[in-house]
Image: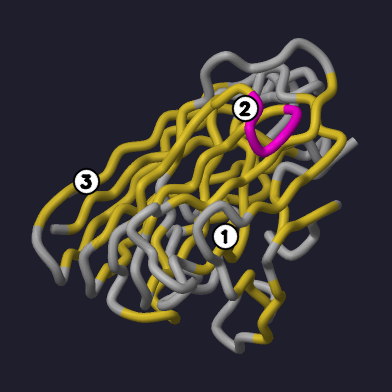
Amino acid sequence: MQPKGKEAEHFTAQSGIIVNDRATARAGKRLGEVDHNDWVAYGPVDLRNVGSVTLGVTNGGLGGTIELRSGSPTGTLIGAATIGSTGGWDNLVSPTVTLTNRPAGTTTLYAKFVNAAQVGGTPDLLSLDWLRFNGAGVKQEPGGTLTLVANAASGTAPLTTTLTATATAPSGQSITDYAWDFGDNSAITHGATLRSTAHSYPRKGTFTARVTTTYTSGETRSLNLTITVN
């Protein structure tokens, strides 16, 4: 089984990519030297009940599209995200890509980097830091409920938003932790009663904020919300 959160450098195969040490990366490393038609592969993966993938990306270069394909670098296109400038190699955004045409059963997932306007391999297109697979996957979701709202969910930079979760635990259990991931590589915050939290986004981009509740059984439930900063 594969974890839902995956560091981009933990690929099973690649073409044209190197792994760069980067102090601001989530695990200290990111993919580098990313050129047109380069790719990385992750497998085996099972995308049952996985509706989307969140990508942690930086771009101080040309930009391009990340194509998610099944089976091969030219296999079925199941999702794509176009990445413009993030203002620098240490400025991370986290768009979420909806998956379509997901294969039945196990496959190898390819992330292919595309920008036909690149000439001579310079500048690099972008840098991929991590991937997160959203949905129940092969496990059964626990009971309980979870909703998430933002005030505000969009606006001009710098944008300060307040994120509020409304949650219930499964019968006979209680919530032991709220974990808040703001989708910009800032520190994840935790608290047993941290139902609401404020966060400031100083620059433009698309960010996927995420709250995860943990129950006394150790089971978790998560929910994403897109924050758009213009």
* Residue located farthest toward the front when viewing the structure as drawn: 120
How crowded is the residue under tag 1: few (<14 C-alpha within 10 Å), some, or many (20+)?
few
* Amino acid at pointer 2: Gly
Which part of the image, by quadrant, shows the N terminus?
top right
Image spot of residue 207 (x, y percent): 36, 54
Q: Earlier in the sequence, mark 2 or mark 3?
A: 2
Query: In the figure, 215 relative to 63: above or below?
Result: above
Image spot of residue 118 (x, y percent): 38, 64
Image spot of residue 62 (x, y percent): 34, 69
Q: Residue 153: which disc?
A: 3
Image spot of residue 93 (x, y percent): 39, 61
Range of residues picked out in magenta? 71-75
Q: Quadrant of residue 44?
A: top right
Look at the numbered disc 3 and give the secondary structure of its residue. loop
* Amino acid at pointer 1: Gly
Tell me whether the residue at label 2 lies in contact with that at label 3, contact meaning CB atoms closer than 8 angstroms: no
Q: Residue 135: which disc?
A: 2
Tell me the CA gap for discs 1 and 2: 23 Å
Query: In the figure, 228 relative to 7: above or below?
Result: above
* Residue located farthest toward the top when viewing the structure as drawn: 104
Which part of the image, by quadrant, shows the C terminus?
bottom left
181, 27: nearer the viewer: 27
Q: Quadrant of residue 217?
A: top right
Q: Is residue 100 magenta?
A: no
How crowded is the residue under tag 2: few (<14 C-alpha within 10 Å), some, or many (20+)?
some
Left or right for 122, reference 99: left
Look at the numbered disc 1 and give the secondary structure of its residue. strand
Tell me the CA gap for discs 3 and 1: 22 Å
How crowded is the residue under tag 3: few (<14 C-alpha within 10 Å), some, or many (20+)?
some
Look at the numbered disc 2 and give the secondary structure of its residue. loop
- From the viewer's perspective, is the residue at label 1 or at label 2 nearer? 2
